[in-house]
Image (tube, grey):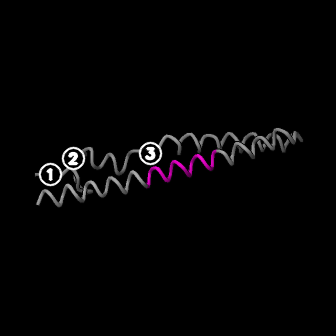
Amino acid sequence: MIDCFEPNSSVRGWGSALEEDVMDKDRVAGSAKEIKGAIKQGIGKAVGAAKLETEGKADKAEGNVQNAIGGLKDTVRETAGSSIMENFHDHER
C-alpha cells in the first residue's frame, strides 16, 4: 500500500499538498507589490519624478512586509501540518 503522506510517495494526498503546494496569498501579493514598486521607483528615478520614486520605494517596502507576513504564515502552516502528521502517524502505530 502506498502511503500518501510520505514524501517519496507516487500518490499525492492532502498531507503532501498542505506541506508543499500551498503558498500564502500574502506572499504572492507582496511579491507583486515589490515588483510594482521597483518599476515605479525606476521610472521615477529615470524621469526625475521624486514623488513617483518615493511612491515606488514605499510600495516595495509594503510588499516586502506583506511577503514576510505570508512567509510567517507559511511557516506556521508547515509547522502545524508537520505536527498533525506526526500525531497521525503516532496514532496509526
Among the two numbered marks 1 and 3 on one chain, the one whose residue lies closer to the N terminus: 1
Q: Which residue is mark 1?
A: 2
Where's residue 47, x and y in %?
A: 87, 39
Q: How many marks?
A: 3
Residue at the image position 22 percent from the left and 58 percent from the top: 87
Q: Amino acid at mark 1?
A: Ile
In percent of width and height, residue 13 lies at: 24, 45
C-alpha gap between disc 1 and disc 3: 26 Å
Say which residue label 3 marks: 23
Q: According to the image, label 2 marks what residue? A: 11
Label 1 crowd bin: few (<14), some (14–19), many (20+), radius 10 Å: few
Magenta extent: 63-75
Residue shown at 58%/46% (left/top)? 66
At mark 3, the secondary structure is loop
Viewed as shown, does residue 14 lie left or right of 34?
A: left
Nearer to the camera, 39 or 75? 75
User: Would residue 49 appear left or right of 18 to someone viewing this image?
Assistant: right
Q: Earlier in the sequence, mark 1 or mark 2?
A: 1
Magenta residues: mostly which secondary structure? helix
Along the viewing direction, whichever of 39 and 92 lies nearer the viewer: 92
Disc 2 on helix, strand or loop?
loop
Q: Nearer the viewer, mark 3 or mark 2?
A: 3
Q: Residue at x 24, y 59 (%)?
A: 86
Q: Secondary structure at mark 1?
A: loop
Q: Do the CB atoms of the residues marked 1 and 2 lie less than 8 Å apart? A: yes
The quadrant holding residue 75 is: bottom left
**Is residue 17 left or right of 36 when viewed as pictured?**
left
Q: Which is in the foreground here, disc 1 or disc 3? A: 3
Q: Going from the N terminus, do you reach mark 3 or mark 2 first? A: 2
Q: CA distance from mark 3 to mark 2?
A: 21 Å
